[in-house]
Amino acid sequence: MASTTHDVFAKVRGHERAEQLRAAREADLLPYFRTLDGPAGPVVEMEGAERIMLGSNNYLGLTGDERVIQGAQDALTQYGTGLTGSRLLNGTIGLHLELEREIADWMGTEEALVCSTGAQANLTALGTLLEPGDTVVADSGDHASILDGCILSRAKLRAFRHNRMDRLERALEKARADEGGILVVVDGVFSMEGEIAPLPQIADLCGRYGARLMVDEAHGAGVLGARGAGAAELLGIEDRTDLRMGTFSKSLASCGGFLAGSHDVIDYLRVQSRAFLFTAAGVPAAVGAALAALRIIRSADGPPLLARVLDNAAYLHAGLKEHGFKVVEHDGDHMTPIVPVIVGDDWKAVLLWRALYDAGVFVNVAIHPAVPPGGALLRTSVMATHDLPTLDRALDAFAAVKASFEAEHGPLPS
Ligand SMILES: Cc1ncc(COP(=O)(O)O)c(C=O)c1O
């Protein structure tokens, strides 16, 4: 029992979302924390029924690949279930080092550092390289772990409106007047909307204002560019990107993260970053799986997988549009595996999610604060391993759900 007059736990009752959460739970409308009953494939068993999986980041479908499973099993057999300590003290195994060498080679950087998650990689880089007196300039749509890294660093944070280059330039003008070092950090591919950042313009502005550039390639690595190295490769600005971050929890079919950059920067992070030093190393099975997945991506089997996931995205995008849905459009011709359907209203998005779920299709729902207020989306995403008949079945379900939804609730955005 707390003895003070103000209980720190008081906030857990009656908070802003409590009522929404209670109502959604009572009506079994909560789209979050749903449980999978089997492997994360293109069609999954979920809560007792088969559902087409359009809500996974397993973009290349490699979590079910026998070579990746073998990589995890071999590592598990050789090193056991866990490493029970940090990379610094007792948690580094040969597989971490092998993976770091292969990531650096893949990214075309001098070195790489393997972390236990992608979020930790962002905290490692931003929380260590930035310090009070520096300015970090971040897109307002950047991932939460980027924002957390910026806050951790206590550098001055200047956010600019999502993908608006005039706002970035204004933030850089102000940053220059701050008189410290400047880092610009953006998602290469934005996780909810699936758009690719205008990296060439961003790199130009960084050059003009003397800023370093960091790109989060969580959704780009293993998907974009001829080598699958991400948005910086696709848009031809690898040599102007100072630091790249990625995750193993999407195309690399595992769990973990990485940073890739110059020897000096990576070595500094290796010994200076509290976020890296004071947590347990990624478990052997996760590292073994990521290494096996990376080898597939870099083999002759990689490019067809990369092409297939983007073709599937284009197919779903066109199909949803044909059925009258408002789908996020991307600048230029570049597709990503993320195909978001704009709904607008939070409750409508949740009701549509439930109707799709009952019709055998699982998608993700993004409501505020994951997206701006009034910008609720159904975030669909495809895998290289979806076949067209499965995507057609999903599109039929979307069409049927739309017809009955609009009959009851009025038109959806088109
Ligand atoms: C853009 C972006 N950055 C970082 C992360 C964090 O990666 P991880 O899931 O490996 O912690 C994610 C994952 O959700 C992401 O979407």
Image: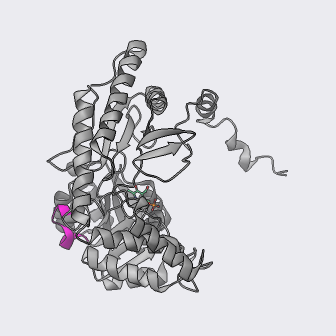
Of 217 and 141, the residue lying toward us: 217
List the single residue furthest toward the top.
407
**Which of the 4 image quadrants contains residue 198?**
bottom left
Work out which quarter of the rendered image holds the C terminus and state it: top left
Instruction: Name the quarter showing ligand 1.
Output: bottom left
The structure residue drawn at horizontal position 33% and vertical position 40%, both measured from the top left corner, is: 390
| Residue 274 appears in the picture as rendered | no
The structure residue drawn at horizontal position 36% and vertical position 63%, both measured from the top left corner, is: 136
Above or below for 305 versus 363: below
Of 4 and 229, the residue lying toward us: 229
Above or below for 45 versus 178: above
Residue 34 is situated, as x and y percent measured from the top left of the image, at 55, 42
**Which of the 4 image quadrants contains residue 238?**
bottom left
Of 392 and 414, the residue lying toward us: 392
Above or below for 15 versus 154: above
The structure residue drawn at horizontal position 43% and vertical position 59%, both measured from the top left corner, is: 64
Residue 55 is situated, as x and y percent measured from the top left of the image, at 42, 45
Q: Which residues are magenta?
A: 234-241
Residue 211 is situated, as x and y percent measured from the top left of the image, at 26, 68
